Image (spheres, grey):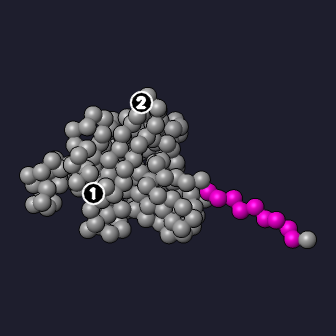
Amino acid sequence: MRERRTVRKTPSLAGQLLLAHPVMRDPNFKRTVILMSAHSDEGAMGVVLNRPLGKQLAELNQEFAHGPLAGVPIYSGGPVAPEQLIIVSWQWLKEESAFQLHFGIEPEKAAELVGTPGVILRAFLGYSGWGKGQLENEMKHDTWLVTPVEGEQLEEADGVALWRNILGSLDPELRFLANEPDDPTVN
């Protein structure tokens, strides 16, 4: 008689946030907040939400200069394919207490969303990606913390402040670690 084995799958992290643990020193991910768009047994991908480039789509490409997407801010989405433009929209649906994410939308669809109440549009150059089992291995080593998107927290801050705010809301010890200086000698 054959023994049955149960394979336990990791729950999908799509639609959730990955927060870099305060001890992470990899410059690609130090103090980052990543919005996960896909996660399966084959790998994972998302975009870094808190690395604004200080530019708008109008500055990137003349096709956007005079259209409705001209003012959409551009962020560095991660180290993979840094020339690739990815347009993302999201919205917190208060009535349902749900986060709605549209990842990799076409410019025509994004243009239709401009001005829609509650919809946030951002453009990303590049993305963050993990091969099969890579993210799960990093998670075993406490490299990342996972948290759902709560309310309008993604609009409350930008840059490292977004990471500090979300991380600090998870645990007092993490709040303490998130506020430590890059150089401990200036403490």
Q: Is residue 54 above or below residue 40?
A: above
Which dot marks residue 135? none
The amino acid type found where label 2 is placed reads: Lys
Image location (x, y in percent) of residue 167: 46, 42
- Which amino acid type corresponds to the residue marked 1 in the rendered image? Glu
**Res 94 label:** 2
Residue occupied by mark 1: 106
Few, some or many residues within 10 Å of mark 2 (<14, 14–19, 20+): few
Residue at 31% over, 63% down: 126
Residue 100 located left or right of residue 42? left
Please provide the residue range marked out in magenta. Answer: 2-10
Residue at point 62%, 57% (across, down): 10
Q: State whether residue 32 is above or below residue 138.
A: above
Dominant secondary-structure state across the stretch colored magenta: loop
Asked whether residue 113 appears in the rendered view, the answer is yes
Residue 187 in view (yes/no): no
Answer whether residue 9 is magenta in the image. Answer: yes
Residue 138 is left or right of residue 6, and the answer is left
Where disc 2 sits, the SS reads: loop
Q: Earlier in the sequence, mark 2 or mark 1?
A: 2
Q: Quadrant of the C terminus?
A: top left
Quarter the N terminus occupies: bottom right
- Residue 51 x/y as whole percent: 30, 53
| Residue occupying image coordinates x 23% and y 46% | 112
Horizontal and vertical percent for residue 53? 23, 54
Residue 16's spot in the image, x, y percent?
A: 48, 47
Q: Residue at x 26, y 68 (%)?
A: 83
- Find the distance from the CA under tag 2 to the CA under tag 1: 26 Å
